[in-house]
Structure formats: C-alpha cells, structure tokens
Image: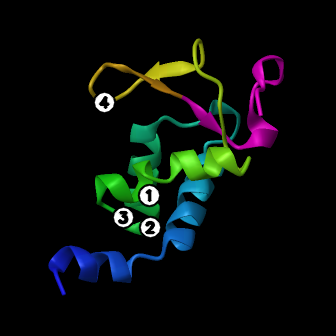
C-alpha cells in the first residue's frame, strides 16, 4: 500500500463536506470565498490541507447545499485575484440565485 492510498483510506469525505458547508454557513449573508473557508476550517477545525476544503465545492453545489452565483458575486482572495463567493442557499442574494 502507498502513502497516498493510506491517506485516501483515512479521509472521511462526508465529514469534510459537512465541515466545508458549516464554514460557509458561518459566514452568513456575507458568504465566503475559498480562502475564507480555508481560514475558518483552520481556526475552528484545525484543518490545514488546502485540498481538504477546496475539493468539496462541486459536490456541495451539485446537491444544493451551497450556492455559487458567479460574477459579480466575487471578492479578492489572499492573492488579490477574484474568487467566487459561496453561500448557504438561505443566505444567498435573492436576485441572483441559480440552483
């Protein structure tokens, strides 16, 4: 067995998705960018791996657990580049909601 296989076996994807969703919910009506979610996950849950959080967005969007509205719903990330803002559906701006 490889180190990568061992790491994959130790991941609880459902738990990580739940944590990612909770981080976004904590942001409320402000929503959260990828960098902000990773910061919340690090402070609140002790998760430091970049991909532990960023790999969760697509699945959460597909199941309707979070919403990404695209432009103009972006904010500068740590690098200065624009990142999409993610919202819990109940906190998403009403005019731009796209399921």
Relative to 26, is 8 above or below?
below
From the viewer's perspective, tell me whether residue 52 is left or right of residue 72: left
Decide: marks 3, 2 in contact (CB < 8 A)? Answer: yes
Decide: marks 1, 3 in contact (CB < 8 A)? Answer: yes
Q: From mark 3 to mark 2, how far is it between C-alphas?
A: 6 Å
Range of magenta residues: 85-99
Give the label on residue 78, or none. Answer: 4
From the viewer's perspective, tell me whether residue 12 is left or right of residue 17: left
Question: What count of labels does the image hold?
Answer: 4
Q: Residue furthest top?
A: 72
Decide: marks 4, 1 in contact (CB < 8 A)? Answer: no
Decide: marks 1, 2 in contact (CB < 8 A)? Answer: yes
Residue indicated by mark 1: 41
Task: From the top left corner, tell me how far across and down residue 11 is, in percent.
Answer: 40, 76
Q: Residue furthest bottom?
A: 1
Queried whether the magenta region covers residue 78, the answer comes back as no
At horizontal 60% and vertical 64% (from top left) the residue drawn is 18
Task: From the top left corner, tell me how far across and down residue 70 is, in percent.
Answer: 59, 21
Towards the viewer: 83 or 27: 83
Q: From mark 4 to mark 3, how far is it between C-alphas?
A: 18 Å
Relative to 54, is 2 above or below?
below
Q: What secondary structure is found at the residue carrying circle 2?
A: helix
At horizontal 17% and vertical 79% (from top left) the residue drawn is 3
Q: From mark 4 to mark 1, how far is it between C-alphas?
A: 15 Å
Give the label on residue 47, or none. Answer: 3
Q: From mark 1 to mark 3, how far is it between C-alphas?
A: 5 Å
Towards the viewer: 69 or 79: 69
């Amino acid at each position: 067995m490889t180190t990568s296989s061992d790491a994959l076996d130790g991941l609880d994807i459902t738990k990580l998705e739940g944590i990612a969703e909770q981080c976004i919910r904590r942001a409320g009506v402000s929503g959260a960018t990828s960098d902000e979610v990773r910061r919340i996950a690090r402070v609140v849950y002790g998760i430091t791996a970049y991909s532990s959080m960023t790999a969760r967005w697509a699945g959460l969007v597909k199941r309707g657990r979070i919403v990404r509205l695209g432009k103009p719903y972006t904010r500068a990330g740590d690098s200065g580049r624009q990142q999409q803002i993610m919202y819990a559906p109940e906190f998403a701006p009403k005019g731009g909601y796209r399921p």
